Amino acid sequence: MFDAVRNNPKFVQIFLVVISLPFALFGIDSYFRDNGAGKNVAAQVGSVEIVNQQLDLAIREQESSLREQMGANFDRAVLESPEFRSSVLDRLINEAAVKTTIQQSKMVVPDAMVQDFIKARPEFQENGQFSLRLYDAIIASQGKTRDGFQQTVRESIAQNQLLAPIVQSAVTPLATAERWIALDGEERRISELVFDAKSLAGSVTLPADAARQYYEKNQAGFQSPEQVKLEYVVLSVGDVSKQVQVSEEDARNWYAENVKNLEQSEERRASHILVQVDASAKPEERAAARKKAEDILARVKASPEKFAAIAKESSDDKVSAEKGGDLGKFTYPLMVKEFSDAAYALKDKEISGVVESEFGYHIIMRTDGGKTKSFEDFKAEAFENARKQAANKRFADLAGNFGDLVYEQPDSLKPAAEKFGLKLVQTDWLPRNALSTGVLQNPKLQAALFSSDSLTNRRNTEAIDLGDGTVASARILDYKAASVRPFEEVAAVAEAQAKAEEAAKLASTKGEETLGKLKAGEELKGISWGAGKSVKRSSRELDPRARKAIFGAKADKLPVYAGLVHDQDYVIYRIDSVNIPKADEDAARIKEIRQRYAMALGEEDLRAFISGVRTRLGVKINEAKK
């Protein structure tokens, strides 16, 4: 808990630990759709099934997220461990449990709240303003539709409303915060006595066969990795687009085909009155709600100038009702379709009829609007989009021909490179586990390269779609299987490592003997302690084991000693003095620590809550499919 508090600098942000709070870019909606009969169920939460396809999708999205976060440090081997798959499945189970709880509680998130959330997200903004172009591009890159993404955001907000109060409910007593500050500020003055394995190596005498015995026991450390020589070619839409030319007629055609979308990108402002009714309500309940909406509409039509007052009095959307029904400015995709269709069909100050949506019945008044851009206003972007459209079409044609050619002439990639004007890249020997740059890091391409057909027959891989408008094919030119290097080749290394191992054992033995004597109170001569220094729990020079040894030692009688193995050496710490400062009287500091500690406690409460929900709903995991 102490480290959790210290290492949580973003304590004021309610981003939940057990499940990631805003699924703004990685929503849970796609995980829980019905994917048809004949499913292989990985787990079941109440009546909700999590099938293997959903688990695989979550794993791919997690992989994408880790690649983006870790860059060159990303190690795909982590993804192949059973523990990683289990952790992703456990997250999906938590998400399913929370989603079910939200559905059972009948929580409703107004459209305006969804709209405000999306418009405020920095990833959807250009120059500080919401960009529909950027919004569409990002959600499309994740395979999501506008409606699907908005539903994801709606569920995320509902999740926050359910879970954030749990995280925020924990309270840290003042005495606890003061004690934490005291411990965090505690200083211990130490000196070190190091038994250096390297300096002891000269006194180690190995038996004649020690190097070979070490080699036999540690052959994994003397293995040459699997290696390949490769050639590959890449065809990308970016390369194709450089060769594409478009005319003004092409640009005008693109504008004509997309003018409706351009109109929808224009902001509107509207107010509404909502008569809320659940989508699963009985027919008589829906009829009563519609009758209520029609009566309100009659009042509004009779006195349009009173729209705001009637909204404040009658609307079930309490957030907008306080503002006379005003929803502020929005673009077409930020509202449910039925609402947007009606709002965008209205003229300024015009009032709609009763509009039905999944939330109930709306009465809408448009309060202002913009003018759709003409072709001349949009000319530069129309040319660019027409060029992209033509490039994508040309790329699709070329990619098909490229795939056919690498398949029909499987023994070389040179014909494909020459026909499509591509660079044929040939590599030197590369370890298989080092194929982590450029197109070679793609898992699908690696799987095709190391298939039995590719390894045995040296044939081209199929044209692999790498995503982002790129296809590639590769071929193994030469191959070396992983093998243990001969002893004669590594004898010197084996001998040095065997000697280092024995020296480490000797250092540990001498260190533990000396530590025992010091603790017994013996006065030892001829030992050389390092210069004294003061350390805190937060000192960067201390690794976790050293910190635990130094600050875990009882300091009621000084000096006190602690020891541990560090790498191949043995280190004894002598603790000469302890200084525990008084609690920090800085009110801001105490407030900060109380908030951090409360957040850590709140996260524990959240785990307990979700555990309780899982128990209530019932969770079954198919261990065979895990």
Image (cartoon, grey):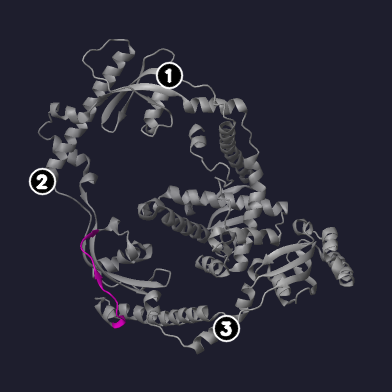
Q: In the rendered structure, find residue 375 and report the number of the disc placed on it.
A: 3
Which residue is found at the position 42% from the left and 69% from the top?
467
Residue 310 on image: x %, y %: 85, 63
Q: Which of 216 and 298 is in front in this view?
A: 298
Between marks 3 and 2 in the image, the one whose residue lies nearer the viewer = 3
Hey, what amino acid is under mark 3? Phe
Q: Mark 2 points at which residue?
A: 488
Residue 332 on image: x %, y %: 65, 71
Question: What crowding class fits label 3: few (fewer than 14 Cα within 10 Å), some (14-19), or many (20 or more)?
Answer: some
Which residue is found at the position 83% from the left and 66% from the top?
307
Separation of disc 2 and disc 1 at Cα? 55 Å
Q: Mark 1 points at which residue?
A: 578
Hey, what amino acid is under mark 2? Glu
Residue 393 on image: x %, y %: 45, 82
Callout 2: SS: helix
Residue 201 on image: x %, y %: 16, 30
